[in-house]
């Protein structure tokens, strides 16, 4: 048993490895709330990466799906008294619909235009939720998304306990990561990678690229919506800025920081970003500028991101086979 | 319910045109940079904001609005030149998303630098003394400053048109935006052209900021929403098209202000709905080239 | 009796403003024939090829495949209908492996939207890909990244990908462009073999090559149909000689 076989073993069972790591993760973090945030935003980044890293579409409106998931879960619970599990389903469903709406309009455009259009469409959703004060609380956000005591298979679990909260959320993230992994390994997964590599060629092979793009976009929206639903439960509020394009920009940064086109990269990116933000906000009030500088340095000097660079180095040294990351 | 008289309608229309003038200038800058460098400048809103701050600052410093109107855009343009040379240029040839992402990071830095220099509250801005008051347009009294804004924009657009159509350098820019290879082959230093165009585009953004400052709150966040609005204008008008930027800018300004009058709750959303409609019917925008996308 | 054509072009014209790239061209292609489109530079060969392959829409006229009007068919439907092409400028997935390139092309016929089963379980696509690689002589390079391949090898890869769609009609735009003499004769052999199983239409400007192997030649000139026939017919055709030799 040498390093080479260990590395390849981990790569082959990437979902299990990731989930195992995430099981012990809270023990590595200074406080649980940060670990929970990283778990949620990690999922958000993984969902976003389906569209960006794997298909090559730079969307600047993905916060809409996080936000829609958060708001609809919250609205179901606060205004309709729905139980938290079906409420999560409502949130995910709503984000799938939002994904269809944005995707259908945005995919009519290409490349650089796509980024601008997704940003602007995201703002439509932002303003719509902002104005619907009666349902969303407007400027103040939606409050009272409380799931204090969770009934899980007859057990009463204290959701307010941070560690418990972490592991409940871990269950959902585990399910989502498993799904994402299946999709990426499927024939459809190879189609979207082909689109990123060479769209014209993919069309010539006989694939309906527009439809494939729309499908992955909707799936991505759903995953981000799930992250949003979990975030609503975690924070007990849904801040209106969840939907703003700056939040979309943040997940772009996370995905790049970790490394696009890799399975676990976005998680690493989310983790590093939030950890950095945690430190930076304590050190300086100009953390936005610090983040901007970090991001520019990343783009200029480390476009593969942290995890991506690591994967690249391993591949170069022959420690890692082919396209499993 | 507000009584909408014809004169109120007309005045609101004029307000929309004044707003549209600012949008047109912004979109022109964006389109110039995109048309020439194929870069979407995500820091465009931030440059607008810096222009507004510098405009107010130089007005306070020199006491002359006209002086600040000239100096502030030049300083913004200089920042743009620095940014292109050291931050954007290394990324050419890497992939179309990289310069976009870099300018996004740049916008974050610009916002915090402004906060550090001018404070987080922003600066108070008021109409310059020589342009205060209102003008009787026949259907009502309209602020002189906004008329000036419309006029100033028209002058800038005309000057730009003359520059692009009638001068040798303008010809290089127009040719280069269609085919940089040809221009390179003709011995033109294309890197320099791109550098200057970026500076010009950001300077125009700064200029629109200086002009807009008296009409809105000047704070470090003012460029954030403006960026999204500028994108709407360029999508509606057609990316890389200067006439498109002007027409779409005015249209978007009018749509916003008329919706603010007739259905105020939907004002902010209205321009994005307009964009969605254009995307459905004509994805390349009014003046855009089909096949440039989709 | 003439076999019914596999693909035909009827009264096709293509105008760019006032410039007529193609004027009223009507040609039909019988099944299992090897045909070449030839003509001097600017004759409209590439334009004609693009109309046949669906890359360009004609201003007027129709394209019919197996009797059906495919003039406005969407680009991605061509492969599904059995029309495959290889591009003039090699267009493959440069960052993927040689095997994966062909596997993705082969996969199309089995699954496009399958989300849950791993692609490794679609054995037919994998086996077909390897078989095709063997046919074009690339099996040994199976795991290499395409960007590391020589130009001629990339061209062969592209043909393997075109064949993966099990096409009835194979369109090839300047297949020997940029190839060494050895590569060129290997390619010509391959094309001759492929033409025995399906209809192949080539665009070539290397006259000698196509004259040797093609059963039928179609000559275009200034966007118009000039002549067609066997290599001998063309060699002895006065108009063709005037057009080619008259140009010095």
Image (cartoon, rainbow, N blue to C red):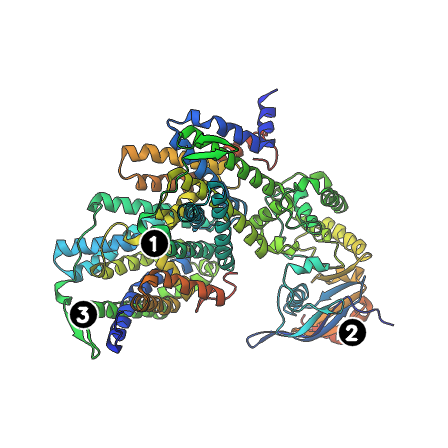
Mark 2 or 1, closer to the camera? 1
Which numbered disc covers residue C237? 2
Give the spatial CA distance, label 2 vs label 1: 82 Å
The percent coordinates of residue A128 (x first, y second) are 38, 56
Q: Secondary structure at mark 2?
A: loop
The percent coordinates of residue A116 (x first, y second) are 42, 56
State left or right for residue A322 relative to residue A166: right
Up-down relation of residue A49 to residue B247 (above or below): above
Q: Secondary structure at mark 3?
A: helix
Q: Residues within 10 Å of mark 3 (few under 14, many from 20)?
A: some
**Callouts 3 and 1 close, C-beta under 8 Å:** no
Outermost residue, top side: A1
- Residue B112 sits in which quadrant? top left
Label 2 marks a residue whose chain is: C
Which numbered disc covers residue B144? 3
Label 1 marks a residue whose chain is: A
Give the spatial CA distance, label 3 vs label 1: 37 Å
Q: Which residue is the site of mark 1?
A: A133
- The answer, for residue C174, to whether it is visible in the render is no
Q: Residues within 10 Å of mark 2 (few under 14, many from 20)?
A: some
Which numbered disc covers residue B26? none
- The answer, for residue B112, to whether it is visible in the render is yes
* Residue depicted at x 24% and y 70%: B151
* Residue depicted at x 47% and y 36%: A267
> How many marks are shown on the rendered structure?
3
Give the spatial CA distance, label 3 vs label 2: 80 Å
- Residue A31 sits in which quadrant? top left
In the picture, the quarter occupied by the N terminus of chain A is top right
Nearer-the-camera pick, B260 or A53: B260
């Amino acid at each position: 048993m040498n390093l080479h076989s260990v590395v390849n073993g981990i790569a082959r069972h990437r979902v299990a490895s990731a989930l195992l790591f995430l099981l012990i993760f809270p023990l590595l973090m200074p406080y649980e709330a940060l670990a929970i945030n990283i778990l949620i935003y990690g999922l958000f980044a993984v969902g976003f990466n389906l569209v960006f890293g794997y298909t090559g579409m730079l969307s600047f409106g993905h916060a809409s799906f996080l936000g829609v998931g958060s708001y609809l879960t919250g609205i179901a619970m606060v205004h309709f008294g729905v139980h938290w599990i079906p409420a999560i389903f409502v949130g995910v469903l709503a984000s799938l619909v939002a994904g269809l709406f944005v995707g259908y309009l945005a995919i009519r455009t290409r490349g650089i235009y796509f980024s601008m259009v997704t940003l602007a469409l995201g703002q439509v959703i932002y303003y719509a939720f902002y104005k619907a004060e009666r349902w969303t609380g407007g400027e103040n956000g939606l409050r009272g998304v409380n799931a204090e005591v969770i009934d899980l298979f007859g057990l009463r679990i204290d959701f307010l306990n941070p560690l418990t909260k972490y592991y409940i959320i871990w269950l959902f993230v585990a399910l989502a990561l498993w799904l994402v992994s299946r999709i990426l390994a499927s024939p459809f997964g190879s189609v979207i990678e082909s689109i990123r590599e060479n769209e014209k060629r993919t069309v010539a092979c006989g694939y309906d690229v527009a439809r494939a793009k729309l499908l992955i976009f909707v799936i991505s929206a759903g995953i981000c919506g799930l992250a949003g639903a979990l975030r609503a439960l975690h924070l007990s509020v849904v801040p209106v800025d969840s939907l703003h394009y700056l939040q979309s920009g943040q997940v772009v940064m996370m995905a790049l920081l970790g490394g696009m086109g890799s399975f676990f990269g976005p998680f690493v990116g989310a983790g590093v970003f939030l950890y950095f933000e945690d430190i930076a906000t304590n050190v300086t009030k100009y953390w936005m500028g610090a983040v901007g500088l970090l991001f520019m340095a990343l783009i200029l000097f480390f476009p593969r991101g942290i995890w991506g660079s690591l994967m690249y180095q391993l591949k170069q040294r022959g420690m890692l086979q082919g396209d499993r990351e | 319910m507000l009584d909408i008289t014809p004169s109120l309608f007309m005045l609101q229309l004029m307000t929309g045109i004044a707003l549209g003038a600012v949008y047109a200038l912004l979109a022109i800058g964006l389109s110039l940079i995109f048309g020439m460098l194929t870069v979407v400048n995500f820091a465009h809103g931030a440059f607008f904001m810096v222009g507004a701050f510098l405009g107010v600052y130089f007005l306070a410093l020199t006491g002359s609005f006209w002086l600040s109107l000239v100096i502030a855009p030049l300083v913004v343009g200089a920042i743009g030149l620095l940014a292109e040379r050291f931050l954007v240029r290394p990324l050419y040839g890497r992939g179309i998303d990289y310069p976009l992402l870099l300018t996004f990071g740049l916008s974050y830095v610009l916002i915090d630098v402004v906060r550090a220099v001018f404070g987080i509250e922003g600066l108070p801005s008021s109409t310059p003394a020589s342009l205060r008051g209102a003008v009787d347009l026949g259907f009502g009294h309209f602020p002189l400053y906004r008329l000036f804004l419309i006029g100033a924009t028209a002058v800038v657009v005309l000057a730009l048109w003359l520059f692009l159509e009638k001068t040798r350098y303008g010809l290089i820019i127009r040719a280069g935006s269609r085919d940089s290879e040809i221009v390179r082959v003709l011995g033109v230093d294309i890197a320099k052209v791109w550098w200057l165009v970026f500076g010009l585009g950001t300077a125009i953004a700064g200029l629109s900021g200086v002009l807009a400052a008296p009409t809105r709150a000047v704070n470090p966040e003012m460029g954030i929403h403006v960026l999204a609005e500028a994108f709407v204008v360029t999508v509606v008008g057609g990316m890389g098209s200067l006439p498109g930027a002007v027409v779409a800018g005015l249209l978007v300004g009018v749509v916003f202000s008329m919706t603010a009058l007739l259905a105020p709750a939907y004002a902010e959303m209205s321009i994005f709905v307009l964009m969605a409609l254009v995307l459905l019917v004509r994805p390349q925008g009014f003046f855009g080239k089909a096949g440039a996308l989709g | 009796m003439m076999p019914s054509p596999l693909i035909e072009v009827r009264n096709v014209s293509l105008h760019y403003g006032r410039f007529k790239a193609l004027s009223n061209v009507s040609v039909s292609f019988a099944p299992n024939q090897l045909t070449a489109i030839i003509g001097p530079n600017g004759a409209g060969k590439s334009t004609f090829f693009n109309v046949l392959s669906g890359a360009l829409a004609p201003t007027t006229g129709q394209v019919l495949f197996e009797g059906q009007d495919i003039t406005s068919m969407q680009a991605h439907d061509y492969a599904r209908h059995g029309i495959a092409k290889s591009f003039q400028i090699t267009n493959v997935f440069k960052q993927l492996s040689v095997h994966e390139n062909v596997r993705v092309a082969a996969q199309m016929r089995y699954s496009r939207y399958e989300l849950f089963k791993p692609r490794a379980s679609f054995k037919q696509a994998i086996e077909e890909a390897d078989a095709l690689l063997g046919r074009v002589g690339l099996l040994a390079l199976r795991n290499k990244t395409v960007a590391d391949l020589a130009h001629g090898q990339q061209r062969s890869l592209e043909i393997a990908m075109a064949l993966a769609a099990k096409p009835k009609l194979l369109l090839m735009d300047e297949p020997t462009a940029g190839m060494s003499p050895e590569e060129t004769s290997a390619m010509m052999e391959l094309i001759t073999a492929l033409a025995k199983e399906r209809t192949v239409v080539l665009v070539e400007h290397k006259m000698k090559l196509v004259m040797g192997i093609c059963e039928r030649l179609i000559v275009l000139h200034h966007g118009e149909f000039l002549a067609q026939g066997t290599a001998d017919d063309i060699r002895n055709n006065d108009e063709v000689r005037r057009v080619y030799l008259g140009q010095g």
